[in-house]
Amino acid sequence: MIIVTKPEATEEQVQHIVDRILEWGLKAEVSKGALRTVIGIIGPEDAVRERPIAAIPGVESVTPVLKPYKLVAREFRGGNSSKVKIGNVTVGGGEVVVMSGPCSVESRDQITSIAHEIKKAGATILRGGAFKPRTSPYSFQGLGVEGLRLLAEAREETGLPIITEIMDTKDLEVMEQYADCLQVGARNMQNFALLKEVGRSKLPVMLKRGMSATIKDLLMSAEYILSEGNFNVLLCERGIRTFETYTRNTLDLNAVPVLQAETHLPVIVDPTHGIGLREHILPMALAAVAAGADGIMIEVHNSPELAKSDGEQALLPDEFTDLVERVRKVAQAVGRSL
Amino acid sequence: MIIVTKPEATEEQVQHIVDRILEWGLKAEVSKGALRTVIGIIGPEDAVRERPIAAIPGVESVTPVLKPYKLVAREFRGGNSSKVKIGNVTVGGGEVVVMSGPCSVESRDQITSIAHEIKKAGATILRGGAFKPRTSPYSFQGLGVEGLRLLAEAREETGLPIITEIMDTKDLEVMEQYADCLQVGARNMQNFALLKEVGRSKLPVMLKRGMSATIKDLLMSAEYILSEGNFNVLLCERGIRTFETYTRNTLDLNAVPVLQAETHLPVIVDPTHGIGLREHILPMALAAVAAGADGIMIEVHNSPELAKSDGEQALLPDEFTDLVERVRKVAQAVGRSL
Amino acid sequence: MIIVTKPEATEEQVQHIVDRILEWGLKAEVSKGALRTVIGIIGPEDAVRERPIAAIPGVESVTPVLKPYKLVAREFRGGNSSKVKIGNVTVGGGEVVVMSGPCSVESRDQITSIAHEIKKAGATILRGGAFKPRTSPYSFQGLGVEGLRLLAEAREETGLPIITEIMDTKDLEVMEQYADCLQVGARNMQNFALLKEVGRSKLPVMLKRGMSATIKDLLMSAEYILSEGNFNVLLCERGIRTFETYTRNTLDLNAVPVLQAETHLPVIVDPTHGIGLREHILPMALAAVAAGADGIMIEVHNSPELAKSDGEQALLPDEFTDLVERVRKVAQAVGRSL
Amino acid sequence: MIIVTKPEATEEQVQHIVDRILEWGLKAEVSKGALRTVIGIIGPEDAVRERPIAAIPGVESVTPVLKPYKLVAREFRGGNSSKVKIGNVTVGGGEVVVMSGPCSVESRDQITSIAHEIKKAGATILRGGAFKPRTSPYSFQGLGVEGLRLLAEAREETGLPIITEIMDTKDLEVMEQYADCLQVGARNMQNFALLKEVGRSKLPVMLKRGMSATIKDLLMSAEYILSEGNFNVLLCERGIRTFETYTRNTLDLNAVPVLQAETHLPVIVDPTHGIGLREHILPMALAAVAAGADGIMIEVHNSPELAKSDGEQALLPDEFTDLVERVRKVAQAVGRSL
């Protein structure tokens, strides 16, 4: 931690800062410059991270030297990547994983037929929402537990493990009966009660980046889950909110290499929500894999114009089949398989 | 709802769009232009809002005519404002309300002495966090139920009603035993499970705007609460996330007049989190009231440099007393009292 | 300047960094921590600011201790504010200055009659665009030199000094014949050729903040003007670009106290462009003055629906008269006059 | 153009809107709903685009039906792409073009040796700044005309055509003596005087997207150049400004497919400035080509830690050689060559 004082800071103020540091059981190294004094704190930074140093009179700025996350840090695994198992599928190795399915589970026919289609095309994990986070209270809110049951039936029929979103701490028990992987959505990325709850689960968790979450915020939210004991976490880039209105969100592919440098957790990209325009999902999926993503999530519907949610951005099964073919070529070009 | 077709849309596609509209029990008005066809939908817009019209082949854009919120809309109250009672304090009338207190409840002494100080200075509602949403799992997470008890004691001593944050649907019952007003924090603004839960409470709710929530998003989240039957809702602007890094957030005072034009719900401004720099909280508080806010929320601590959270942005009791005096003058200059 | 090394940085890399610092004629203070080494650079920071230190192998981060601006810094004036004269009007003292006029000069009648109206209402500086920065090449581009002549006639008639926008380095000479103050628009805030050119002018310059310019960027652009010898500079906050689309821009009033803490230059606020919705300009003007602005700029038109540019956000003369009255009350409430 | 009225709009106001439309020589189609009236304007939208319709009393919103750009629109070329020649290199066909070179021209040796290196690696266009837009007036501002001469010598030696930035309308003549392609930088994207000037040049122009420019803004700025007669325009995505601070900018690859759908102009991506972190330039370059970019621009320096500008993000020649090899494989995987 490095403290820089204000130009008008007095001798007494500098001494008071040093005294506080000593009180906390650390050492202070003071360098007086012509205009400002720089105070380095020597010792474990954790002991001071939570102190409101900027509130001490005379302090101009406080700069941490170490990262605030530990368990998610790449260094924690000695620079290696983690692998996470979802059912029988391994995420985080040489193979790029394709997750697919409809936005919402709507009926047995719908989810089962889509599950068959995406499996044939090459997807290995089935997604589908049973509890739906909708901006409007008047929108379709999902089939709830009935949706979970239909997902489980589709798994039975196809063998595909399933991932579905959890929205409430109260739902963990029922989720654990049906799901193979829990999804924490973008809007709940900083729902800390929920993060702690899924941190106590045995199931793997895919944590989606919030719309205005920095990469550091995302890693800190993942740290919540790991700190409760659950290390089976995937991170998912799904578009951030910027000033651009042409696209629904701005898919931030910069996050892919940055996350891979910072953390050992696998990184999934969701181009469907990320760009939100069905005609442009393909190029963004190709770009995600070229950038190094460990997997992609693509929404598919057999009748988008009748979908109960997000039909505007769902691909038809045929379009999805074509997408997987093209993604495979790019994966190979960057030394991965699919 | 107005649909504009792509320039290359065929006759069949236009007809298919019209057929869908008729299927939904509405009428379609078609105007063919040189390049594009415009289709107006006549009838209740709610019936089509949730349909994925943009997924129908040939559609270029879909523009709603009506607002997606109803119960929160100013029109719902015939253009009048709502008043919300928190304990014996009325929010939303001619008087500007001042809420104040520490970020976190830390001890009986701390909360009680601060409560006395802010009451003397002119605050009428006491804030204090018992359950704290912290970016890091290693930060102080609040005293929990014990914090609620200490808040209630401070209310006993001072007569000030209390507002405190709820983070988990599981906590509603215990919250209702102690609090006079529930706060839903910025990070939970789209935690829809929580919104529904507090919508079923008898307590008033202050809903804070999320860091990347548009004004429409905020109103839709409030709509969730009202649609469950709880009309005692305050909205709170507390800073949005922009590219600017000098300030902690960008307090968006534009939201004040815009919200007051769109909704009947009272609007509170939180300059403490909004700008996040203690030396600049005063001018932002003055500006908030000049812009028309129905109240402000200001964090105060008697020893900021020892605070367990957010000490960097807490005012000292004396600074707060001065702030209230100055805010009062601005309130009077714009025809309000305090 | 403080350098933090990567955890994997070798002894040789640390030594190489130190050697570079010594080469530049400075001293290095090395503190080895458990994970990272911190190197403080002792000596004039300017000598290293432009060096690509982050390009040296083993460097993780580089944190400057000093501000990159000098002439604009508040410290440069010993903590005092500057006053800038525009014609016979002083900006930056106890009095809040009101600049007003139409977006574009359209005709002799238009500019002269508006000038009379705004003068009567209390404005002391006349604005009007002769060269107009328009997003579309097909929009009205301004009357050019003819517009400047008409502005000068309006000054003749009313005595109001005039401010108008310069868009091209080639136009400085003609501008200097007519204008009392040059405006550099938001879109040219980092047009460094133009900044240097107006820096060589005798006329005062009002520099508008770019739509995505940080406060630091704005100050660095002002530094360009001062570094060429022109110290008569006003800064103008006019709205930044955020994710919010309800308003045209997000007027960032946080910039007012922050700029006043960082620089001695006067700060003007332009609520017209800032919020861009005529019905909400009044509260934002009140808030700007409450926040401490040294002046406001308000667009007025006598027939907004026939205006050749920005009619949507122009106030009618009567509305403007009312606004000035109300702004005066708020100015007095915060200890200023108008 | 579709006008929606406010709920409280009177009959007279609606009639007044209709009258205005008729005055402009167009037809109005009025549909009265329960709450609001919708007025469609029939006839050439250009005739009304510039009218301040929102300033007419009773108007709530105005939605254009047509795009505001014409010459740059994909439809203008009947759906085909344009090819632009820079020297003997064609941009916009099946081949992905690689532009490379240092940020700034620093010396004859530097530019010539880098030119040889990048040519050997596979680049076909040489970049290098002679006039440099620097945030600080105290930073290296480029060698000016001398830099242009050195670039021309490097072209002589290697045969690579050169692209370099123009910052001032006054410099066009000298630029035309030396350059093969003009670059308009991000900070000048809405310097309309400069856009008009380069629009009158015979040289091709690469227009970089401004840091907070929407895709529509970028296209409107390109429209300025085409409307002056110069159709040889490339667009360049180089990172936008968002809330994320880990990366220097947020490279917005969403812009690639969106631009290719909207315009016939070739699209270049600059990952160097886009992400601004040398260790992550490679994956972003791969992603750019996978997303469909017509070319990439990569900064290379033979001694980054001694570079006079942007050394932190320059690749070494060997790293660049490796990058081109990998980019070639991705190009082939998406059906392009390099």
Image: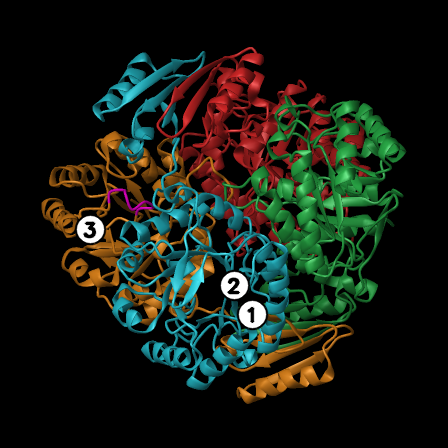
Chain colours: A red, B green, C cyan, D orange
Q: Is residue B80 visible?
A: yes
Q: Is residue D222 above or below residue A208?
A: below
| Residue at the spot of label 1 | C313
Q: Chain of mark 3?
A: D
Q: Mark 1 touching mark 2, by CB under 8 A?
A: yes
Q: Residue at x 53, y 74 (%)?
A: C300
| Residue at the spot of label 3 | D162
Q: Quadrant of residue B272?
A: top right
Q: Chain of mark 2?
A: C
Amino acid of disc 2: His
Boundaries of the magenta span: D134-140
Mark-to-mark CA distance, 1 and 2? 8 Å
Mark 2, Cα crowd under 10 Å, few <14 / some 14-19 / many 20+, is many
Q: Is residue A208 magenta?
A: no
Q: Residue at x 70, y 25 (%)?
A: B141
Q: Residue at x 64, y 44 (%)?
A: B271
Amino acid of disc 3: Ile
The quadrant the C terminus of chain D occupies is top left
